[in-house]
Amino acid sequence: MKTGLQVLIGVLIVLVVILGVTLAMWPAEEGSQKATGHTVKVEKPERQGEITIGSILPLTGDAASIGQNTRHAIELAVSEINNAGGINGNNLKVLFEDGKCNAKDATNAANKLVHINNVPAIIGGLCSSETLAAAPIAENGKTVLFSPCSSSPDVTTAGDYVFRDMPSDSFQGKYAAEVTFNSLNGKDVAVLYCLSDWCVAIKQVFKQRLSELGGTVVMEEGYEQTARDLRTQLAKIKQRNPDVLYFLGYTEASIVGLKQTKELGFDIPIIGGDAWDDPKIWEDSKEAGEGVRYTMVSADLPESFKSKMRQKTGTDEITLCTPQAYDAVNLVAEVMEKAGTDSAEIKDELYKVGDYNGVSGTIAFDENGDLTTASFITKIVHNGKAEVEN
């Protein structure tokens, strides 16, 4: 019969043997393991991290059609970036916030993205009211704010961290005045405009350029952006009998206003701004939109981009700002490859961009984060579809 001491010694021997075998099989700290006298390198898989940026778009309310189409383009760009390896091996993620095309909701969205989510960059806003409300928050928080759509001239001086790849209305307002005066014979022009940053700013540029050409804005009628009845303003304009109506508005009010011009018997040319590059307007206004014109930035889109958007959305619809949003995401990602996630370094690298070839055209920024060049076209509506006017 074994003594207690013998049993204890036996147990200890077994434990030592087990420990020895275990240590022999355990990989070394330096990423290697020993086996049959050879050192075998163990490849440790890299953990993929995540880089998060924000986006402020009108996902509901006025301009929601444009906002949703733009979101699809942002998601498409993110998917392509991540499938190609991400940003220095890190997946890109976007937090979307609804700016609703107004200052109040855009302010709330910007505060959340800057102060709670601490994102280094934000794609947006779309409406100028969104961008101008978010700009001081982004500037104080040293967060890059990159708008693919806001065209108000006031965005030019909104901050050092503010960029856009949509041309300023200092270009579009002048172009619209020239089309009105030279092509539509608009010497006496009435302006119907929403009381938003975009409408007010482009109206001022239009008015100044028309005056320089020899025309006159004979009447200006403003309305709240949320208005859904413009009969009072339109009745005054009709009584004044102008040569042309320059009508600035977002989707919902524009549909109502165009229908009411038909009801009131308007028979003069009507021209609008680039917010009218929303198919919903022409689908819903029906015959009231026939023959209506609007100006917008030139967009000769690559077939490859059109095809990818068609696969993403199931339609051929590509609205204003959608190509610019796609380019904005890709450009920010490219800059992050060099600068990392430090927003100050992202900002500095963006100012160095001089010839980025995007689907919306060549992108180069001036000292204010504005595009250095821009070209515009006029579209005219026939049978519910907008097409480029030759």
Image (cartoon, helix red, strand yellow):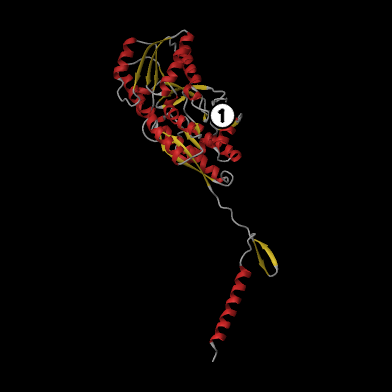
Q: Residue at left 51%, top 38%?
A: 120
Disc 1 is placed on an element classified as: strand
The answer to whether residue 102 shows anywhere in this view is: no
Q: Position of residue 185 (x, y in %)?
A: 44, 11
Determine the residue located farthest toward the right in the rendered image: 37
Amino acid type at image mark 1 = Gly
Q: Position of residue 374 (x, y in %)?
A: 54, 23
Pick whichever, 261 or 212, lies toward us.
212
Q: Position of residue 182 (x, y in %)?
A: 48, 12
Determine the residue located farthest toward the bottom in the rendered image: 1
Q: Quadrant of residue 230?
A: top left
Instruction: Tell whether 36 sits left or right of 126.
Output: right
Determine the residue located farthest toward the front in the rendered image: 5
Q: Residue at left 29%, top 23%?
A: 229
- For mark 1, does the 10 Å Cα neighbourhood hold few (<14), some (14 to 19), or many (20 or more) residues? some
Q: Position of residue 48 (x, y in %)?
A: 55, 50
Instruction: Tell whether 103 sits left or right of 161.
Output: left
Pick whichever, 138 or 264, lies toward us.
138
Report the number of numbered marks. 1
Instruction: Tell whether 373 sits left or right of 389.
Output: right
The N terminus, quarter of image: bottom right
Q: Quadrant of residue 96?
A: top left
Relative height, residue 218 to residue 67 (above, below): above
Relative height, residue 385 to residue 340 (above, below): above
Give the residue pinned by disc 1.
361
